[in-house]
Amino acid sequence: MEHPAEFGDTDPRAMRVWLDLMRAKTGDEKITMVFEMTELAMAMAEAGVRARHPNDSEKAIFLRCAALRIPRDLMVRAYGWDPEGGLHPDTGRWRT
């Protein structure tokens, strides 16, 4: 297999070892990895939201995190909150 361009900073021998390890995994192991990586990505996104909005309620954190993954129109329909609308998710008042 040709060395993928996006892994250009990885030694080709290390890439072969990694690919062999990935190929040896069962389907169950691979899907478990996907779920674990997704959980990690969501936790990191939540940490970023909490760092940017330390005084927000759990509801506001939930809405802000959801808005990172859900299109704006669906956020408005599903949760009644427009992430681009300028209103704070807790108070319904204009952000300052």
Image (cartoon, rainbow, N blue to C red):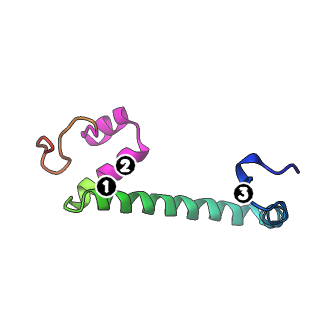
Q: Which element is circle 1 on?
A: helix
Alpha carbon distance from label 1 to label 2: 6 Å
Q: Indicate the position of residue 61 as horizontal and vertical percent values.
A: 28, 56
In the image, 85: left or right of 36?
left
Residue at (20, 38) in percent of width and height: 86
Q: Indicate the position of residue 29 as horizontal and vertical percent values.
A: 70, 66
Residue type at numbered disc 2: Ala
The answer to whether mark 1 and mark 2 are in CB contact below 8 A is yes
Residue under label 3: 9
Residue type at numbered disc 3: Asp
Q: Which mark is nearer the camera, 3 or 1?
A: 3
Alpha carbon distance from label 3 to label 1: 37 Å
Q: Earlier in the sequence, mark 3 or mark 1?
A: 3
Task: Look at the image and say whether residue 66 sits in the magenta stretch.
Answer: yes
Pick the front one: 22 or 51? 51
Q: Which mark is residue 62?
A: 1
Q: Indicate the position of residue 2 as horizontal and vertical percent values.
A: 86, 49
Residue type at numbered disc 1: Phe
Pick the front one: 34 or 18? 18
Badge 2: how crowded within 10 Å, few (<14), some, or many (20+)? some
Q: Which mark is nearer the camera, 2 or 3?
A: 3
Badge 3: how crowded within 10 Å, few (<14), some, or many (20+)? few
Most frequent secondary structure within the magenta stretch = helix
Residue under label 2: 66
In the image, 61: left or right of 29?
left
Q: Quadrant of residue 47?
A: bottom left
User: In the figure, 84 relative to 31: above or below?
Assistant: above
Q: Where are the magenta residues, as a range?
A: 63-83
